[in-house]
Amino acid sequence: MKSMTVAGFVIIWLGCSGFAVNPGDTPGGTEKRIQTLIRELDSAGWSRASEALVRIGGPAVDPLLDALNQNSHWISARASAPLSMIGSEKAVEGLLKALDNKALDNRIIRSILQSLGQVESERVVASLIRHLSHEDVWVRCAAVRSLGTLGGEKAEAALIDALQDRESYVVGSAIAELGQMKSASAPGPLVDCLEHGEGMTRIKVSRALVQIGETSVDAIVSNLRNDMDRDTCWHLVWALGQIKSDAASEPLVHALGSENWMVRNEAAVSLVRIHAHRSLDPLRRLLKSSHHESRTQAAWILKTLESGCSNLSAPSWGRENALADHATVSASEETTPVIVERTSYALCPHRFGSLPSVPSPYTADDGREIVVTSTQDSTYMLVPVTLENSDRKGRQRYVDADDFPTLAQTGYHSAAALERTGIITGRSTAEITELGRPGRLSTSGFLAADEDIMSVLKGDNRFARSLGLSHTQLARPLFHVLNLTDRNQAHANYLSYEGHRAEYPPCLYHGKTISVKVEYTRGGQESLFDDGLNGALAIRISRDLEPREKDYLDRKYSHLNPQQRDELVSKLSSLFIGEMVMYYVQWYGFYEGHTEWRADPIAIAFIFGMKDLEEIDSAFAGRLHHALTEHFTR
């Protein structure tokens, strides 16, 4: 077990924290203070109350044990923390005894188990192990986490057994704890777990193997020799590349012959990642292979190793997009009136009684970008939505020129360059594909289950070229919407709020009236790429079809059944996106795959009036329903 308890450290720290018992307190006064502090466990200041109870120490144990068994959710659940930090024999014995109370709420049991993770004791470990068979999944998860914190042979063996749990949450917690412990006994069971798990479980296994390090290599290599074409092999090859063991070179070269493109791609990237110069001769021999993909990957590895430019780190963001090179507008300039054809117009929160004669969107001579919004009381505002490179708005004027120089120069991808792309932001295209599928980083996924990142990039690049709109142009209205919804905008007083939802004033854009609604329901969404982005919003953008557009669709798509017709209208006239996608479009030409979060280029062009419906339909040869619904696959 670990040599020093966290509880011991916390008690030492609390001695200096200002929560000393008043020397003048009578026994009755101390008791009253303890009861007051216990009641405060059911308040916003509960953590300070808990710290004060720890500082009081022994006299607080019995009242806390009484509170623990009251089965009052917040007070009882939070009483376990100061008891474990006090750490006396009586406090720990009381916590263990409380676990035998069959009537105790599972939420309180979880809190006790989490608190016991700070107490080194054979009896505590035994109790935690017993709770691995508890009927409640979250109780089992709490026991797993505390066993991982305490460590030791018995805890390690119990966590390996927990890999067989019927619930993926428990298995995932056990995997993570074994990785943190760098368990020397875990690689074999973890590799076995990889074969039976799915989605995030597999990703967690590969990450745990990397945390364990060199000790994992033998188990990984042994498993890889069985069959190089399995889907699970990608995870093992990825782990070898991250561990960077010399012993990985031979199996990685062998993996280049896999029939699975993800295994081949990751093996090539891993060989570059570990600078496998000892593999140069086998790679040169592969150049004469009858297997086309093996020859291609070997040639790429050799060229990359010889050039010394592996591009295996996140972009430097040092090159600005030449197609968006206006100077960044400072916050103070956003309040300065804008001049349109010699007429000065005040910006929001100023409201106009009639529609001002300002194009929307409008770019002023000084580089400021403006959109017109109509408020709930039939007035209008001019709202600054200028794209910026700033701490508040992020890198809205950049493109990933390190990975896609042609995109940065022209606004489009080079088809030939995409064929050669194996790495984006330092991640292999196989890794990005795996992370992007449903049930990995996102429940819905950044890609459909049958899509991969390169197929989607290629497909949307074709779409952008067909529309005659660059990725930079298609990203701009999405950035305008994002900047319009900035919670720091001065016009926020005019929003309609309902819970975590906000409805913004309609936005006028190329003569179209755009509806914008925001839901603050997507917090903590990690980016698919290694680019520092994260998500917290779900943005709904839509507009109604005009009568002539409705008539056109009725006439041209009369062959569709009612369900297909509704699907066509929905996908054409509405978007449901996160706030990362506009950056994705600008930086990588990525609109996400065919999931509910897709920002289809066709829909962007239609909703924002960038192209007329007949122009769009002509660009896709009268097959709009097919273009909007067909997945991009290999």
Image (spheres, helix red, strand yellow):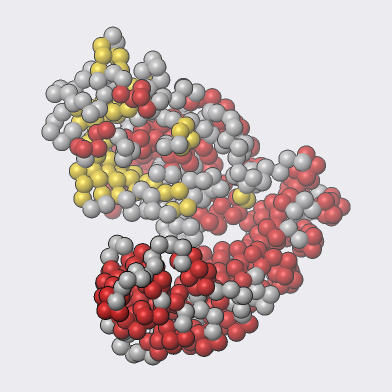
Using the rendered view, name the quadrant where residue 189 is placed. bottom right
Q: Quadrant of residue 61?
A: bottom left
Front residue of this view, candidates 180 and 37 = 37
In the picture, which quadrant includes the N terminus? bottom right
Q: Residue 589, position in %: x, y?
A: 50, 38
Image coords of residue 411 (percent x, y): 52, 30
Question: Can see residue 272?
Answer: yes
In the figure, 570 relative to 511: above or below? below
Image location (x, y in percent) of residue 179:
61, 69
Q: Position of residue 426 (x, y in %)?
A: 62, 47
Taking the view exactly as shown, the residue that stands out farthest to the front is 24
In depth, the one of 159 and 195 nearer the eye is 159
Left or right: 473 in relation to 334: right
Residue 192 is left or right of residue 549, and the answer is right
Give the left or right position of residue 191, taking residue 410 as reference: right
Q: Nearer the viewer, residue 585 or 122?
A: 122
